[in-house]
Image (cartoon, rainbow, N blue to C red):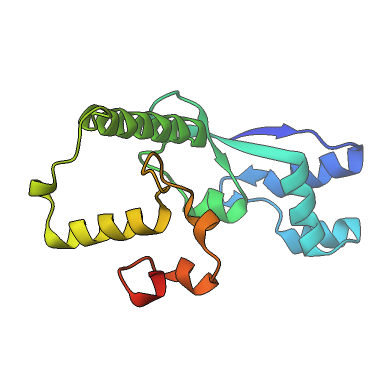
Amino acid sequence: MQLDIFGSNERENEICRLYWETDSDGFKWNVSQIAKEFGISSYEVQKTAKNNSKAYSDEHFCQHCDAPYLYSNRQNYISARPYKWVCDDCESEMQNRSDEMKISAIKKSIDINSKISLDILSARDAVFLLTLLRHSASEDLSCLNELSLNISDPRRLQKLSATRLLD
């Protein structure tokens, strides 16, 4: 395990060092021993260690960028042995790429200049389209107004359907 300690004073640094110190049996000191040694609560020991140090794995790395696994606390060190792990940055990048691919696929499937043929609409789709037009279209049908701009009765916002409420 690699340990980065960045406390603002020697006391915080020592608490962090003892908190993460290991031997062949596991952790050398338990949290209550550290708390008693420094005259603080167990919660304060954990909070100090979390805020002033980072412990990185020597064995587990991100599958994509080889960043070391960051342990969030002692329990995570003991229990979390990630076999295949992806760091947050790589996961975010993969999600962004996936979103871009979806947007690109949607843009390819939609031709903005194409007109909707009423012959291919189901009866249900035709009713919804008519309802939307009657509710939000301008008088000359040149644009659709934003849904919230056309609602004077809040009950209308709950359900946009072909009912008397929308007439």
Query: In the image, is residue 66 above or below residue 165?
Result: above
The one nearer the camera, 1 or 131, is 131
Q: Which of 127 and 9 lies nearest the eye of the viewer?
A: 127
Quadrant position of residue 95: top left
Give the image location of residue 62, x and y in percent. Answer: 44, 31
Q: Does residue 8 sit above or below 132 in this rendering?
A: above
Q: Residue at x 55, y 66 (%)?
A: 152
Residue 32: give x, y in percent of width and height. 76, 64
Quadrant where the N terminus sits is: top right
Q: Position of residue 34 (x, y in %)?
A: 80, 56
The structure residue drawn at horizontal position 37% and vertical position 34%, both measured from the top left corner, is 99
Q: How many numbered marks are there?
A: 0
Q: Quadrant of the C terminus?
A: bottom left
Q: What x and y, as percent, mark residue 13?
A: 83, 39
* Picture quadrant of residue 52: top right
Left or right relative to 119: residue 30: right
